[in-house]
Image (spheres, helix red, strand yellow):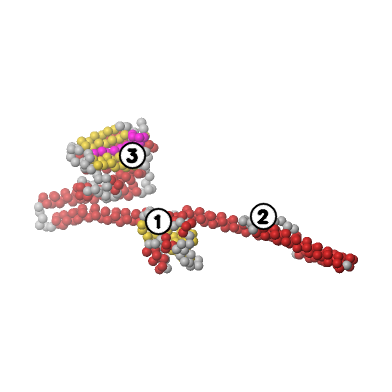
Amino acid sequence: MSDFWQRFSGIIFVTFITALLWAALGAAKALMFYSIILLWLVIYHLRNLAALDRWLQLPELTSSTIPDSSGSWGDVLARLARYVRRHSQSQQKLSMALERIQRATSAMPNGIVILNEKDRIEWCNPMAEQHLGVNLKLDAGQQITYLVRQLQFVEYLATRDYSNPLVLKQMHYHQLTLSLQLVPYGDKQKLLISQDITHLERIETMRRDFIANVSHELRTPLTVIGGFLETLSEENNTDSDVRQRALALMSEHTTRMQRLVEDLLMLSRLENAQNIVSEKNINIVEMLHDLSQEAESLSAGRHQISLNLATDAQLLGSEDELRSAFANLVSNAVRYTPEGGEIMLHWMIHEGQGLFSVQDSGIGIGSEHIPRLTERFYRVDNSRSRETGGTGLGLAIVKHIANRHQARLEIVSRVGKGSRFNIWFPVKRLILA
């Protein structure tokens, strides 16, 4: 109220002075005085209006650039400065909140696309750009179906039933498998959420293959055992030779199933991330002497087996696991090397790493098979593998054990020339004498 009374008092004062001049000097003098006051007021207001207009033309309106003034304009401009300051602070808070949201959505493993009521792209995060091949700078405002053109997605978008996600395979050159879910919100807007399930799909495929392979591996021995049990149960069968042959084959197939179960249990234990590798000093020289003798026993004089120990370095790790890995490679060499062939076991330091290798002069392996040799149940020759007693899991076990020791399994082979299986151990696993 004080500002109002000050202005009102000013008007009364000017009117009073004008009346005095009218009475003392006449109407002409009074009107001249009044005109001068009015002219000054017009100039005052025009000057402040011009200053305000110049401020409004600035590219950035801030409280610090608002012009100064006095009187009633001073009050107006001061209030305007406070409003601009509050607005600037609110805008800054909103910008910071938006930046935090954008950082959070950018860090999300899922893609997010905001679609308007016409299914046009308003915004998306970087992961959505990777999943869907979208470029926000170029594609903002585009119909989502112009960019994701798979018929299943177009139909999914048109049905308006988004209760279940849509799975799309072989997306773009990455060959991704994506799960897409549309979530309606707001005024006919939608969120398109994409999730990369390639790894989950691969695991599910492996699970199905694993079950099929295990079932296949067990079916033959169980069928054989069942058949012989049926034969032996016949009362008229008194032939002792048939009985002995049946018992021998049942024992053989039972042993095969037992080895398969043991290998499956070992793989399960190795794949359990909670099982930490024990850190013990392992005398590799002594272990390889034992394995060499076991190879001689398994070979029964059919091969020439040699042991080359170029170092007495020890290894840090799990003795049981490494013995299992080395024994797998040695037994494979004995089983797949023809009679009269050579098998060599090496332990050395090469290029700063520990190198254990098993080299043979066996049948060799085609280059097209080598990348898949460590897959479960993968066999180059199914019939030969079963004849030699293999479960199809040995090299998968070797690879897992090597990985658990930060080592690397390397396979070098040529058909008809033989194979060499190398396990390279990092220097941190070596204990030099």
Q: Quadrant of the N terminus?
A: bottom right
Q: How many residues crowd mark 1 within 10 Å: few (<14), some (14–19), many (20+)?
A: some
The region drawn magenta spans: 349-360
Give me the residue at 32% from left, 50% from top. Answer: 268
Residue closest to the far right: 24
The mark closer to the camera, 3 or 2, is 2
Q: Quadrant of the C terminus?
A: top left
**Could you say whether the residue bearing mark 3 is in a helix, strand or loop?**
strand
Report, in whole angstroms, how far the alpha carbon at label 3 lies from the one at label 2.
70 Å
Q: Amino acid at mark 1?
A: Asp
**Residue at the spot of label 1:** 196
Give me the residue at 57% from left, 58% from top. Answer: 94
Q: Amino acid at mark 2?
A: Thr
**Is residue 359 located in the magenta-colored stretch of the structure?**
yes
Q: Nearer the viewer, residue 29 or 82?
A: 29
Report, in whole angstroms, how far the alpha carbon at label 1 lies from the one at label 3.
34 Å
